[in-house]
């Protein structure tokens, strides 16, 4: 597998649309399509590859070579929860924590 196939596979696996991945990574949606094109896909510069990998929660090495663990970073859903939590007011954070504790106690 090559970069294009790894990227397409990870986009599909993540459930993100190209628009969502573009917003999350800061990489233009049109550029993302060129990286997964079936005919003559292009390879992005290293900094762009890093942004895409980070947004997908995988390593650059995995996208480029298919090597190493697929998701050595924090899973995308967990990262989303943490990022969203950090935007909440202190009062809302306390409410979320209380809700999580309550949910955990009923498992």
Image: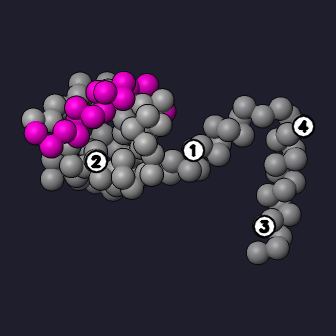
Residue 27 horizontal side relative to residue 75, left or right: left
Which element carries disc 4, helix, strand or loop?
helix
Q: Which one is earlier in the sequence, the residue at label 3 or at label 2?
A: 2
The stretch in magenta equals: 24-39
Give the residue at mark 3.
104
Residue 26 pos. (x, y %)? 43, 25
Which label's residue is closer to the chain start, 4 or 2? 2
Left or right of 96, for residue 9? left
Q: Earlier in the sequence, mark 2 or mark 1?
A: 2
Q: Residue at x 47, y 37 (%)?
A: 20
What is the distance, in whole Å, between disc 3 and disc 1 at their CAs? Answer: 19 Å
> In the rendered structure, which disc, 3 or 1, sits on the residue that comes first in sequence?
1
Mark 4 crowd level (few <14, some 14–19, many ≥20, 10 Å Cα) = few
Where, by quadrant of the figure, is residue 55 drawn?
Answer: top left
The C terminus sits in image quarter: bottom right
Residue under label 1: 79
Badge 2 local density, few (<14 within 10 Å), some, or many (20+)? some
Q: Which residue bears the numbered disc 4?
A: 91
- Residue at image mark 2: 8
Q: Is residue 72 visible?
A: no
The answer for how far apart the CA atoms under marks 2 and 1 are is 21 Å
Contact between labelled residues 1 and 3, with CB atoms less than 8 Å apart: no
Marks 4/2: CA–CA distance: 40 Å
Q: Position of residue 106 (x, y in %)?
A: 82, 73
Determine the residue positioned at 78% across, 67% down: 104
Q: Let me know if residue 26 is in the magenta part.
A: yes
Dividing the picture into quarters, in which one does residue 41 lie?
top left
Question: Considering the numbered disc 1 on the image, is that residue within a helix, a strand or a loop?
Answer: helix
Residue found at x 72% / y 31%: 87
């Amino acid at each position: 597998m090559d970069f294009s196939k790894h990227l397409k596979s990870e986009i599909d696996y993540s459930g993100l649309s190209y628009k969502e991945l573009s917003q999350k990574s800061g990489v233009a949606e049109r550029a993302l399509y060129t990286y997964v094109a079936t005919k003559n896909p292009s390879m992005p510069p290293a900094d762009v590859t890093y942004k895409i990998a980070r947004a997908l929660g995988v390593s650059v090495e995995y996208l480029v070579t298919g090597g190493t663990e697929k998701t050595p970073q924090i899973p995308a859903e967990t990262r989303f929860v943490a990022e969203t939590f950090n935007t909440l007011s202190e009062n809302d954070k306390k409410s979320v924590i209380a809700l999580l504790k309550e949910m955990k106690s009923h498992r």
